[in-house]
Amino acid sequence: MSTRTAGDLLRHWRLERRLSQLELAGRAETSARHLSFIETGRATPSRAMLAHLCDHLDIPLRERNRLLLAAGYAPAYAEPTLDTPAMDAVRQAMRQILAGHEPYPALAIDRDWNMVDANAGVALMLTGIDARLLTAPVNALRLSLHPGGLAPRIINLAEWRGHLFARLSRQIEVTGASELIALREELRGYPGGETEVALPEPDQATVPLRLRHDGAELSFLSVTTVFGTPMNVTVAELAIESFFPADAETRKRLSALAS
């Protein structure tokens, strides 16, 4: 995608969103003819028009920058690292959420599912993990499904694997990220791939993570938190994965471990 024109990229995202030129033109309050000219390169869109179309196509901020560059414009969204002063408030908010969730596990991940921070509760998930999987960058999906990671301790591995693959596939559909496509192919090569799409029980409200730990079973519900008004690429691609006890026994054991 990096070598395509702005028109090519717009067409790509329109097709990804399963919209015809007429449908997108109607939503964006422009003509299908003008949109066709933009996609074929016969018309040069303004920066404002590109931003307007990006909004209606719900294009991720990273890809909006790519589209603007292809059209000859400067990127609109910065991509600061988390350790810059501009990210102090975000970093502090993230730490507050992670610390406030203890003694239950919680971790922050970037777009590629690499861990950028974690609280003390995550330690119980790292028991017996192959040290090579804990070398930065630590990838949460690889850590979960690799045979040297959590996979041997996950009681409902097929079900949990199916849940993770469904999430990853939805993310790929939204972002089109080649890095995530490559990660999905890698994960498919791990043992258990033949049961990738195990379905939960019909009356089950959520898919729990059922984990063996010190001879007992811990059961967790996972919740994903994102920043509601991201204005740069880094914040838009951050997520916090929080794990809550799914039953009283897990809550009791985690409280005992914390004390």
Image: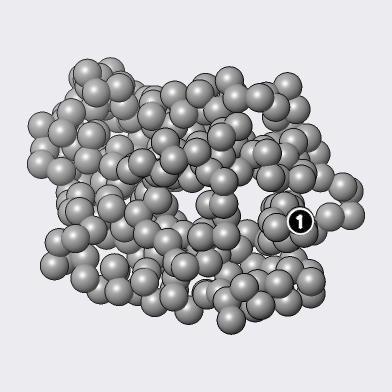
Q: Look at the numbered disc 1 and give the secondary structure of its residue.
A: loop
Left or right: 241, with 29 as reference point: right
| Depicted 235 relative to depicted 30: above or below | below
| Place of residue 13 in the rendered image (x, y in percent of width and height, measured from the top left) | 40, 31
Residue 59 in the image: x percent, y percent?
Answer: 37, 42
Residue behind mark 1: 215
Residue at the (56%, 40%) spot, across then down: 149
- Residue at horizontal 35 percent and vertical 65 percent from the top: 229
Quadrant for the C terminus, please. bottom right
* Vertical side of 180 occupied by 114: above or below: below
- Judged left or right of residue 154, residue 228 is left
Where residue 192 sits in the image (x, y, percent)? 70, 27
Q: Can residue 90 be seen in this view?
A: yes
Q: Nearer the viewer, residue 117 or 231?
A: 117
Image height of 14 relative to 224, above or below? above
Decide: is 8 above or below 16.
above
- Residue 61 coordinates in the image, percent (x, y): 30, 46
Residue 237 appears left or right of 167:
left
The amino acid type found where label 1 is placed reads Gly
Which residue corresponds to the image point at 77% horizontal and 44% vertical from the top-left? 156
| In the displayed structure image, the side of residue 152 where residue 46 appears, left or right | left
Residue 93 vs residue 148, the one in the foreground: 148
Quarter of the image for residue 105 reads bottom right
Q: Evaluate whether residue 21 shows in this view.
A: no
| Mark 1 surroundings within 10 Å by alpha-carbon count, few (fewer than 14), some (14 through 19), many (20 or more) | few
Q: Which of 131 and 222 is in front in this view?
A: 131
| Along the viewing direction, whichever of 170 and 57 lies nearer the viewer | 170
Quadrant including the N terminus? top left
Q: Residue at x 15, y 33 (%)?
A: 69
